[in-house]
Image (tube, coloured by chain):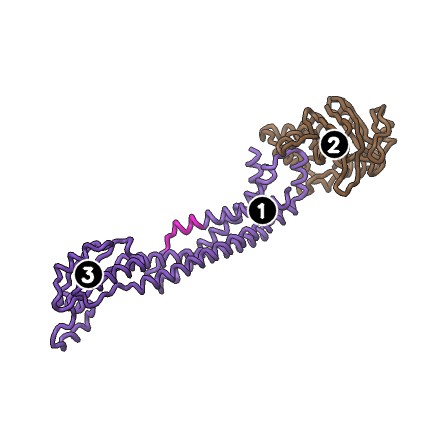
Amino acid sequence: MINFEHVLKVFKNSWTALYDINLKITSGEFIFLVGPTGAGKSTILKLIYHAEKPNSGKLNVLDYNLHDHIDDNKVAELRRKIGIVFQDFKLLNERTVYENIEFVLHVTGTRPQLIPEIIISSLNLVGLANRKDFFPYQLSGGEQQKVAIARALAKEPKILLADEPTGNIDYKGSAEILSLLKTINYNGTTIIMATHDNVLAETSKKRIVSLENGKILSDGV
Amino acid sequence: MAFKFLSQEAFKNITRNKSSFFLSSGVSAACLLLFTIFLVLTINVYRIKNTVEDRIEISAFLTDNANQIELTDKIMQLDGVKQVQYISKDDALKELRIDLGENSNILDILQRNPLPASLRVKINPDYKLPTKLGELEQKISLLKGIRETWSGKDIIVRLHNIISVVAGFDIGILFIVFISVIFIVSRTVEATILARAREIEIMKLVGATSAMVKFPFYVEGFFQGLLGSIVSFLITVIIFYFISSFVPFLQMPYLLILVFNIFWGSILGIGGSYIALSRILK
């Protein structure tokens, strides 16, 4: 499903973010990318959703060869198969919970008559159907992240990327988010979660890829 | 169907940013108005030129002993001559009486008819250019029996000069309008893009195509230009209404001016959006 082979990523300011990364992720896995700030966790996620391109090596995601040139429409097609959740939620504050998800479904070409049902089903999954008319600023951090997850799930992604999803949330909220991600994974979605919280990852009994200074230090459960 | 939603989004955005939308439309209208006024002026100058050209003819005044039949034959053989009409001394006097109207009794004090007989030479349209007209006039004036010729060539030269200047202004103003409207619309759209940076970021992250991301901004640019063009047209109509009461022979082709405004307003609006999007959404 995802295959990194000797991937090197150097940014324009000559800072090498990833050295010779070899990483294979199969369908249905739940994998943690752990490490301190600057370890390369977010860069790996960015390479997967093609916000960045590798400088060398091979990268294959869902049968897209991302080390080759790929046109904008193909990138859009790839991203429609991937859900992304961020630490800062990236919700639109002037829109309600319902409208935030509706917006994404419309711009990704979902048939309008299907949209209400998909939204309610996604919100039910994260337990926030009763908050659909709330604005993001009326919700707690944990609830906002659940809305972001519901928005990502609405597209029925094959892969869900979570970049520090619990970074802005308290302990109780973090546990809820993790539990929710596990449920989503149980239903078949591959999950890759970047976190600097080693404890959270270790207690989950899932595969952990440990990174430091752009190199993989360890990979295993 | 996504484009229907995105059009609605564009209208919502226009409603949210009314002041910048109307300001941009207003400046577009002012620029287009400037050009429209010059366009109306140009159309009228051309119309006057055509009217004058329709009346172009060469009057060849004859000496007293000239053979008008022989001269008519010779002139008819010259290139560019369409028709030759003989005007006798008496006919010339009658025409002068008609031209003088109420003041024609001034002619009664004359002892004899001072007007010469003449040949009125009608010209083919392609010979109504100043140079060709001048050459033909000269050929006629050199014929034996011709005392003097008159063609109004100077008026044609002056009209052509005026048209060159007006056409130069038109091109200059079109250039200024083009640059101004594109600049203004692109700045407004740029501000809108920056204000909606998060929305655009989300659209890109979730896999909206480039066309979908850009579409609302093109809609917005189009409507800015369209509103500007309609306002420009309406102001032109009002200005024309007032001016035509002082200068009644002025004409305005309403449909042409409306189509012209809408076409350029829309094109420039979309062009402004295109520049802004190319600059920001790389």
Return the x and y of residue B232 as percentages of the image width and height.
47, 54
Q: Colour of chain A?
A: brown
- Say if the magenta span includes residue A77: no
Quarter of the image where the N terminus of chain B is located: top right
Disc 3 and disc 1 on one polypeptide chain:
yes
Identify the chain of the residue marked 3, using the numbered disc in the image.
Answer: B
- Which residue corresponds to mark 2? A56
* The magenta segment: B252-260
Amino acid identity at mark 2: Ser
Q: Which image quadrant is residue B117 in?
A: bottom left
- Name which residue lies at 84% across and 30% down: A216
What's the distance in space between the residues labelled 2 and 1, CA to CA? 34 Å
User: Is disc 3 placed on a helix, strand or loop?
Assistant: strand
Q: Amino acid at mark 3?
A: Arg
Q: Which residue is mark 3?
A: B120
- Residue B236, horizontal then vertical, whole percent: 43, 57
* Left or right of A94 on screen, residue A140: right
- Residue count near mark 1 (Cα–Cα under 10 Å), binned few <14, some 14–19, many ≥20: some
Residue topped by disc 1: B275
- The hue of chain B in the figure is purple
